[in-house]
Each structure stands twice: as structure tokens, then as C-alpha cells.
Image (spheres, coloured by chain):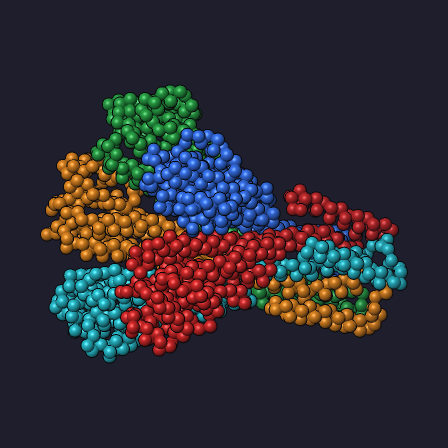
Chain colours: A orange, B cyan, C red, D blue, E green
């Protein structure tokens, strides 16, 4: 088996290989125009796959890079996007153990490696969501909102990659291409199962995140409600005192107890009593 | 029929059996790496199934443990996760009645037992949701919110297990594998019906829980609205008194009734009248 | 045709019939363990159907009871849940007109009667929803919320029954069982159409109810907004008077007009003017 | 071709025709029991279709009336609901141009006319939604809420009619009934395309309307937020004045500047300064 | 190959071509009645396609114009809507390079060009959504709400165009029409992939936009909550001072410290202490 590693998709080497193996011009174009979706296409004499290697960026977002593979009967061509560390590492690892492997076996190992690279990213988001759930119930802040949003964005992106990769895996599993030996079928099915399970997980995470947002909204509404109650209870306590002291501050004649030496005590008692009655009414209406 | 019970998936016994019955390496790997989804795969000479035994943990969350089964023409291998009480109990029970059973009959009984273990968990959540519904309408608290969220989480998890188990049951029902006698078909169909019904129930519970959350939000909004009304009515009652007593507290000349011996009574009457008019206006606008 | 009516599923009569007509043990078990979903299964020599009779309970909830039917070439076995009035009535009615009918004709009439029993329940909920819609716009109260929730619950339950019944009807319509004469096919199709239409109606009612809840939330938010505005306008009217009268209540020297005999009039005018300016500003900002 | 127009479904004329053309009793029953869904059924020797004519009622709601058609090789029977103006008009129009037409051609023209009658209704709702969108952003009122709700209701109803009509059109397009000449096929496909497009439009309108409701809620929440801010800013401006003037209104000794002739000016300055500081703090926190 | 360019669909030239190439009257009608959906139909001897050219209007909305194509074995007829600049430009460009092309090759190039015209519009909305996301978290204003709504509207419209175009591309890809040479198949598949990817992108953008609206609502609720807290804290600080100064402003006898020369200091200290205690309680309840 010949394994051609192309690290710069713009290199003329790719054109030479295209001519030699009769690769379709549209596939060469796909290699050079990045941001393709994961896909697999069977052509005369070879199979062309675009895989997405996923990595977690330092700012918590998800980085994607394309890895294009041409699988022929006795050749394998891999085309990498520049500067993608995880893809490089994976290829080197497979290459190191590739001596004696058939082309379809090496192809399986690469695909398996790509799919395995999704798991740590998914685990990371499981942890992030656990943390967000706690925050949202305990102390919802605008920062929590921002993080929920970023996570949602990342999950939408991940879901898109996984759906396409599942289609690739499904196609490979069902494919009866003669390029892939029959003994590889259970292994391809295993990849399909892995991707499906990952996709289930992402859907579950999206559900949980949507739940978090609902809880956030309910939680904030609840707190506003309690702030309002405190404000109202405070107002209720203060109002009788304010109104009655206002009355006794008027420069008018005829108010009772103005001449009594215990006037202040009597009126103060009156205030306390009014406040107590109001509080009792609120209590009856089950306010606190 | 030979029934091999493996209680530690790491034991070399499993390797010996794998060699003896020609079990596929990927299936052995599945037994040893836990957290698989429920699934069933037909291989040459045997059928490999991963089942999920569900139990209710003490903190109300849902515990899952894997039970792997290899069904051959005249052998049955069961692989248990360590320390899973319900799975252990189920196997002992089937084993006790297994003498004289064919391998596929024992396999049916185990699967039936696993599916039956879902029902008490589902019943538990039905009760929890009933309780949450009442709480949400009567006295919505942040704790209710937390419980809604935990229940939602458990239902998402349950749904995932049930969907996969339904696929397993569906596969078994449609399978025309010669490992399963024809007379077992109605029984496998019965399992499929049970799981489908359970799944229906979980979907219904999810619907009800989503409804609870909506009601929670509406209920809190409604209470805030009523708190606001009380605050406004209180303010409305107090304002005339505060404003008028403020006026009469000024060190200015020219206010009416300042020299009248009934000044306080007149002004007090004025306050009461203003308050009454304001309340009547609010009444007209259908505020209370 | 022999029609066997079993009114108590626990009776040994059912066991005798099971032996005589070779009924499958799982079907007998289904008759005895209630709370089955509606379903139909074809067995050797007979067809087993579980139907759900629906009735409206006094508290507005939906009551379900099972009616199990075994349809053979020349026999019909009906098994009723104890004390279900509507099922009893329906069977008596069909039985009264059954002389001379073939088994499949009687089976059709029973199924048709069961499906017809859904309509008054659906009509009831249409009326309830109309009423809720009006309430939600005019005067949303927590009671409305409670009723929306109960109705939602009932519709979720109804939907589940209808989906299963539609599957039964669809199976009967497609079935080419020799137990059902060809001339009955248009009638079975008619049942399928009826159930589908009922299901459409329930989906529509669910949509309307979800809409009601959204409207409720919007309506309450809107009312809170208006309460807040009234509170703010009241505060705006009172504040200048409170602040200015506070100033003139201070035991300080140097305030203007304190010695003027028209002091109160001047300062009162000042208050009124400030209030008027504030109201004009709010007016400009389109607040009321 | 014989065209039989029945204007009263209860008339014995329909029974005579049923006997003459061997129409199925269930179809005659469908004609007499109104409120059927649109559907099409092929019977021996004829094709039975129920179509829904849509019209816009004066109060903005959607009126439906049934038009039943029996299409035979050389006859056409149309059954109208009483007093449906648009259906009457359509039939007269087709009849006027029907001389020399085959039965299937007349049938196509009627169906086409019915489908064309949906467009003005859809256009009406497009306009209503445009208007609601503007209102919801500019000046959301409870009336807007009421109209959103009515429109939603009408769209749910329209969608139901269109889904059923699309199924009818799909059935006609796929049907290889010998009652319909092959040259009519592109025309039936055209009807299918029209209905599908209308259905797309209704789905789009539902999406937009759901959006309007979300915007309504957000818009009201936003306005409440701004009302609260104004209230808080007003309170902030007034509080220092109220507190300080309260202090100087006390009948106590030892307050500073009580004897200064510029006391009022000094304390007034103090109030203004405190207010200015509070406003600056709010400004810093980006409140206005 | 003859390429007929029709720039005015009303021109009699189109009728002449219809007669010459036996174009179906319904297709000619489709060309003349605008606002068709994208579609493709195979007729005897030719293939009729309606494509939608998309452009971004100055006000940010999405403009659509129809481009109708008749593809025959050796002819191509293109019908443009008046005054559509992008369609004109595209046709000129393909025409310039069309000498020596077969009809199906020219058809592919036009279709490819139309699909390429969607990308800049999608990119524009990606940017708009990025911007809206930032605004919604940082400073949600009613204007943001308006822009979210307009963008939602545009995406609903875009989605509709893309779904129909994908159906067209899918039909072309599966079609085994002899009008399209076999070597064109991979190219048609490429178009299908492009449109599917665009559709994925629009779905993702819709998800993100829905998220933005949720965040908006949560963000506003959060801000209202914080405004309420500030209001309550301000009230809490002021209330003791107001109540106590009210008490000492009363014209009553018997209040303590009224004769003390340090009365003001003592009472002032009392006010400060009460305020401090209230703030400490709020602090304990984790309010700020």
C-alpha cells in the first residue's frame, strides 16, 4: 500500500496524484476549498471521505479542521489542513503502526481516531453543563447567561459535525464497496455506533441546556417576586408610622393627646398596633 | 445448555470463553468498557446483547448498570457490572428456574426481567410529577424549581435508555435468527410492546413536566403581579395623607383652617375623602 | 356465531374459552392485567384487540376502561373491566341488533361504537378551551392556570389513547386477515378516518391550549407593566409635594416666602407646577 | 356527461342517484353529516371527493363549507352545503363553460377553483401578520394580544384544511384511476404544487406569528424594565431631600446650622449634592 | 445548441418558442405568473426548472427573483423576471463561456451560479447574528428586538427558498433523464451537497437566533430584578431615617432626648444603627 501524505492542499503534489489515480476534479476542489461538511463519496476506483477533527480551543469554543482521505485499492491519500495539531498527531500514530496494514485497515484506524477525538470535547461540555445547572439554581448572574449561550452555540456546532459524521459512518457501514474487505464491516459498524451514541449525548446536553435557560428565567422571576415582597413588607411596616407621624406634624389644632404628657407613647403604640394588624393581614394571605 | 456467569468482566475466564465460542474482540471490548448503550448484534453463531438494568438511587437519581448477554445455540454467557444488586437478583431468580430451559428461553426471561425493572422507576416519577404539579400551582418555591430540574434530567436519561432498549426489542422481534425458536416470537413481541408503552409514558411525563415549568413561570409572574397591586393599593391609600400632612407641616402662613379648633378633623376628613376617591377610581379600572 | 361475554376477567370461564379456542396465554394475561394500551394482534385462528372506552368523569378528568375482544371465524369473546357503564351499554346495544350478524360485523359495530364514544369527550374539551381562551385575555387568575393545566393533562392522555387506537384502526384497514370479509374493508377504513380526524382535533386543541398559556403569560406581564405605570405616575404626582413640603417643614432659617402672608399659596402653586411639568415629560415619552 | 347538482344533501334525489350509480352508503352518509375533512376515496366505478371551500367571514374568522363530488366515467355529482355563496358561484362558473367537457375535466376545474379560493384568505392573513408585527414592536396592547390569538386560531384551522387538501391532491396525482385521462396528470400535479405552496405559506405565517408573540413578551418585559428604572431614578432624586428635610423637621436640639441665617441654603446645597452623587453612581453603573 | 434568452415573460417570442418546442401551457403560465417556488418538472422532450436568484436588498431584507429554464436536448430557454441585476449578470457570464457547451452543461453552470449566489447572503446573516448576540447580552434595547425579528423573518424566507431548491437539486441528482449526460451526475450531486450545507447553516442560524431571543428575555428579566434590588436597598437605607424623623417631627410630648443638647446626635446615631442592621440582614440573605 502507498500512503501519500499531503500537508498543504495547495501543493502541486496533489495535482500529480489526481492525474495518476484519476481523482475527480470536484474532489480536488473540495480538498482546496475548506469548510466542507463531513461526507463520503464513492467514485470509480476510489472512495473520497472528508472527516472533521474536533479540538477544544483555549477560549472554550470548538475548533474544526478538515481531514480529506482518498481510499483506493492499494493507495491512501490524506490531505490535512495546515497547522492542525490533533490531526497531525493522529496520522503519525496510525502511520507508525501502519506497516503491513492494508489501505482499508489504515483508513479504519484514521476514522476511528477521528471519532475518538470527539469524546473529550463532549465530556468537557458535560462538566460545563453540570456547573451551569448548579449556578442557575443558586446564583443566576448575567455571566451565567453568557456561558449558557456560548455552550449552546458550541453544541449546535458539534451536533452539525456529528450528524454529518454519522451519515458518513452509516454510508460506510451500508456500503458494499469492494475497496473495503468484508472482515472490516463489524468495525465500521462499531464506528457508527460510537458516533450515534455521541450524537445522543449531544442531544441530551442540548435538552439539559434548554432546561437550564428555562430554569434561569424562572429563577430570576422568582427572585424578582421575592424582592417585591420584601419591598412591600417593608413599605407595609413603615406606612402607618409615616402617615400617623405626618398627621401629628401638622400645624393644626384639635388632634387628640397633643397635651397629654404620654402623648408620644400613646401615638407610638397606635403606630405599632396598625403595623401589627397589617402584618397579620399579609400573614393571613400567606405572603411570608 | 451451558450458562456461564461472569461477575467480573476483567476476569481471564471471559477470554477463555471468547476463544472457545469465537466471540468477536469488539464484543469483549464492549463488555469491558462500561457505559455502553443498550444494543443487540448478530454475529456468526451467536447473538450479543447489552441490556441496561435501572434502579432508583437513594438521592432520587436513576442508576444504570450494564448486563451483557451472549446467546448461542446451546450456551448463554452473562457478564455483570460489579456490585449491581438488582441485576444479581434477577439472574439468580432466572437461574433458579432455568433447569430444563433452552438458551433462548432463559434469554427471554432475563430480558423480560430487565424490562420489568423499569416500571417501578416510572411509577416513582409519576408520583413525583403529580406532587410537583400541586406544588407549582399552590406554592411555587425555588426548591420546586430544583426538583423539576432533577426530574427532567432523570427523564432525559430514562428516555435514552428506553429508546435504545426499544430498538433492541424491535430488532429481536423482527430478527429471524435461527438461535431463537419460532414459538418465542409472541413473547419477544410482548417485550417490545412493554418497552413501547413505557416509552410512551416517559414522553407523557416529559410533556407534563414541561407543562409544570410553564405553569411555574406563569404562577410566579401572577404572584408578582398581585404583590405589585397590593403595593400600589397601599401606596394609593397612604399618598393623600402623606401629601396633605406634609403641606400642613410647613412653616408657612396662609394655609386654611390653621386657626380653627376643628382643623385637624377637617383636614383628616379631606385626607379620607381623597383616599376614597382614588380607591373608587382603581375599583372602576377593575383592579381589585 | 357464538358471542361469549365475560364481565369479570378473573372468572374461570375465560380459562375454559382459552382452552377451547386455543387463545395465547399472553393474551389472557393482557385481559387480566389492566392498563394495557389499545392494540391489535393477529394469532393463529383469531384476532385479539384491546380497545379503550373513554368517558368524562364528574371532576372533568378522562376515565379509560379496557374492552378486550377475541374475533374468530365463528366466535366473538368480549372481556370487560368491571363497572364500566359506557362499555356495558355499547355491548348491550350491539348485542340487541346482533342476531344474524357475522362475527366480523359485530366486531366492526363494537369498534365503531368505541370510536364514537370519543366524540362527546372531544367536544367537551373544545368548549373548555374556548372558555379558557376568553378568560385568559379578560381576567387571568391562578384558577385559570389550574384549569389550563388539567385540560393539558387530559389532552395528553386522550392523545395517547387516540394514537394507539389509530394504529389499531390502521392495522385493521391494512390487514388482509381472512377473518374479516372483504366487504367490511370500506367500513374499517371509515373507522380509521374517524380516529385520524379525532387525533387531528386533539392536536389542534393542544396547539390552542399552548397558545392560551403563552397568552396568559403575556397578559400577566402586560398587567404588571400597567400596574407599574400607575404606581410610577402616582409617585410622580406626589414626589414634588412631598419634597417641597419637607423643605418647608425644616426648622431652619432663610427659606423664601416664610414671612409672606401668601406663602402657602405661592409654595402650593410651585408644587402644582412641578407636578405638571413631570406629568408633561411622561406624556411626551408616551407613557399614558 | 351527466352533471347532477344536489343543493340540499337531505333531498331524496341523492338517494335515487345513489341507487342508480351504486354509490356506497358510507359516502352518502358523509354527504349528509357535515364537518368532514377533505378526502378522496376510490370506489368501484367512481371516485368520491370531499373538498373544503374557504371564505373569510366578516369578523375575520375563517368559514369552511363542504363540497362533495362523485366522479364517474360519464357522470359527475356535486353536493353542496346550503347557503355557501363561494361554492355556488364556482360551480355556476364551471358549469357555464362545461359544455363539451369530459367529467374528469369538469372535476379538475372545480378542484382548481376550490384551491384558488384559498389564496385571498392567505393574503389577508399575510397582511394581518405584517400589521401585528409593527404593533407588537411599537405599542403592544392587550388588544394586539387578542388579535394574535385569533389569527393563530385561524391559521391552525387553515393548516388543517390545507394538510387534508394536500393529501387529496397527492392521492389524485399518484392515482392511476382509469376515470382520469392521462393528459390530466400534469394539471393534477399543478394543483398539488399549488396546495403545497399554500401550506408552506401557512407554516411560514405560523412561524412569524409565534415570533410576534415572543416579541410581544420581550417588548412588555422591556417596557416594565424601563418603567422600573424611571421609578428608581425618581426615587433616587427624591430620597436625599426627603431624609434630610425629615431630619431638620425633628423637634430636637443639636442639629448644625439651625441658627445660621443661611441654614436653608446650606442644607439645600447638601441635598442637591447628595442627589448629584447618587445620580453619578447610577450613571457609572450604565443605568441611563 | 440554441440558447433563447427571454427577458420579458410577456413577450410573444415565448409563445412562438412554446409552439416550436411543444412546451406545456401550464409551464408557460408558470413563467408569466411570478412568485412560483423553485421546482423542476420533466415533460415530454424537455425539463422545466424554476430557480430563485437571491440578493440582499439595501434595507437588509432578502429579494427573490425567478429564473425559469427549459432544457431540451439541443436547446435552452431562459426566462428572466424584469430588472433582476444578479440574474442578468449570471446569464451573461455563462453565455460568454458557453460556446461549444452542450445544453445540459450550460444548464449546470446556470444552476451552480444561482446556488453560489446564496452564500454571500448567508454570510451576511451570520455576521448580523454574531452582532445581535453581543448586543443582547451587553445592552438589550427595543431596537435589538426589532432587528432580531427582521432577521428571523429573512431566515424563514431563506429557508423556504433553500428547501425548495434542495428538492430541485435532489430531483436532478436522482433523475435519470436522458437530457442530462451521465458525466454531469457528480456535478449535480455537488450542487445538492452545496444546497444541503446552506440549509444546515440556515437551520443553525435559526437556532442561534431563537437562542438570542431567549437570552434577550432572560437578560431583561435579570436587569429588572437588579433594578428592583437597587430600589429596595435604597428604600431600606431611607426608611429608618424617614420613620424616626417623622416621629420626632410630631407635636407631641414625651419623646425621649427632646431636651438633651445632644438629642440630634443620639437620634441620628439611632437611625444609622437601624439602617446598618437592616443592611446586615439583607446581606445575610445574600442580596448584594
**Nearer to us in this view, A235 or C196:** C196
Name the image quarter holding residue D184: top left
> How far from the left and from the top, in percent, is residue E264?
73, 65
**Nearer to us in this view, D96 or A169:** D96
- Image-based side of A187 in relation to B57, left or right: left
Identify which residue is drawn at 31% across, 72% down. C18
Name the outermost residue toward the left.
Answer: A100
Identify which residue is drawn at 20% across, 37% down. A24
Name the image quarter holding residue B10: bottom left
**Nearer to us in this view, B266 or D90:** D90
- Image-based side of E125 in relation to B271, left or right: left
Q: Is residue C162 visible?
A: yes
Identify which residue is drawn at 20% across, 74% down. B101
> How far from the left and from the top, in percent, is residue B64?
32, 68
> How far from the left and from the top, in percent, is residue B208?
46, 62
Name the image quarter holding residue E37: top left
- Image-based side of E209 in relation to C30, left or right: right
Identify which residue is drawn at 26% across, 43% down. A82
> How far from the left and from the top, in percent, is residue A103?
14, 48
Q: Quadrant of the N terminus of chain C?
A: bottom left
- Image height check: is B224 above or below C79? above
Amino acid at each position: 500500500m502507498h500512503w501519500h501524505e499531503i500537508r498543504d492542499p495547495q501543493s502541486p503534489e496533489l495535482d500529480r496524484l489526481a492525474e495518476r489515480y484519476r481523482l475527480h476534479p470536484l474532489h480536488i476542489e473540495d480538498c482546496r476549498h475548506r469548510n466542507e461538511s463531513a461526507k463520503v463519496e464513492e467514485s470509480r476506483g476510489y472512495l473520497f471521505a472528508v472527516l472533521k477533527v474536533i479540538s477544544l480551543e483555549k477560549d472554550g469554543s470548538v475548533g474544526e479542521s478538515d481531514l480529506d482521505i482518498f481510499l483506493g485499492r492499494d493507495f491512501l491519500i490524506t490531505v490535512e489542513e495546515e497547522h492542525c495539531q490533533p490531526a497531525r498527531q493522529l496520522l503519525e500514530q496510525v502511520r507508525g503502526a501502519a506497516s503491513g496494514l492494508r489501505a482499508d485497515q489504515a483508513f479504519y484506524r484514521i476514522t476511528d481516531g477521528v471519532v475518538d477525538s470527539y469524546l473529550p470535547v463532549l465530556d468537557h461540555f458535560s462538566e460545563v453543563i453540570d456547573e451551569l445547572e448548579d449556578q442557575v439554581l443558586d446564583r443566576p448572574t448575567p455571566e451565567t447567561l453568557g456561558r449558557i449561550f456560548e455552550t449552546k452555540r458550541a453544541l449546535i456546532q458539534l451536533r452539525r459535525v456529528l450528524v454529518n459524521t454519522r451519515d458518513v459512518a452509516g454510508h460506510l457501514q451500508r456500503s458494499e464497496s469492494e475497496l473495503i474487505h468484508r472482515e472490516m464491516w463489524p468495525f465500521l459498524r462499531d464506528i457508527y455506533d460510537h458516533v450515534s451514541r455521541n450524537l445522543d449525548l449531544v442531544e441530551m446536553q442540548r435538552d439539559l441546556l434548554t432546561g437550564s435557560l428555562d430554569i434561569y428565567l424562572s429563577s430570576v422571576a422568582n427572585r424578582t417576586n421575592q424582592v417585591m415582597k420584601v419591598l412591600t413588607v417593608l413599605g407595609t411596616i413603615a406606612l402607618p408610622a409615616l402617615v400617623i407621624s405626618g398627621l401629628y406634624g401638622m400645624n393644626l389644632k384639635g388632634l387628640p393627646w397633643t397635651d397629654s404628657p404620654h402623648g408620644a407613647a400613646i401615638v407610638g403604640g397606635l403606630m405599632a398596633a396598625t403595623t401589627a394588624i397589617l402584618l397579620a393581614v399579609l400573614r393571613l394571605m400567606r405572603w411570608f
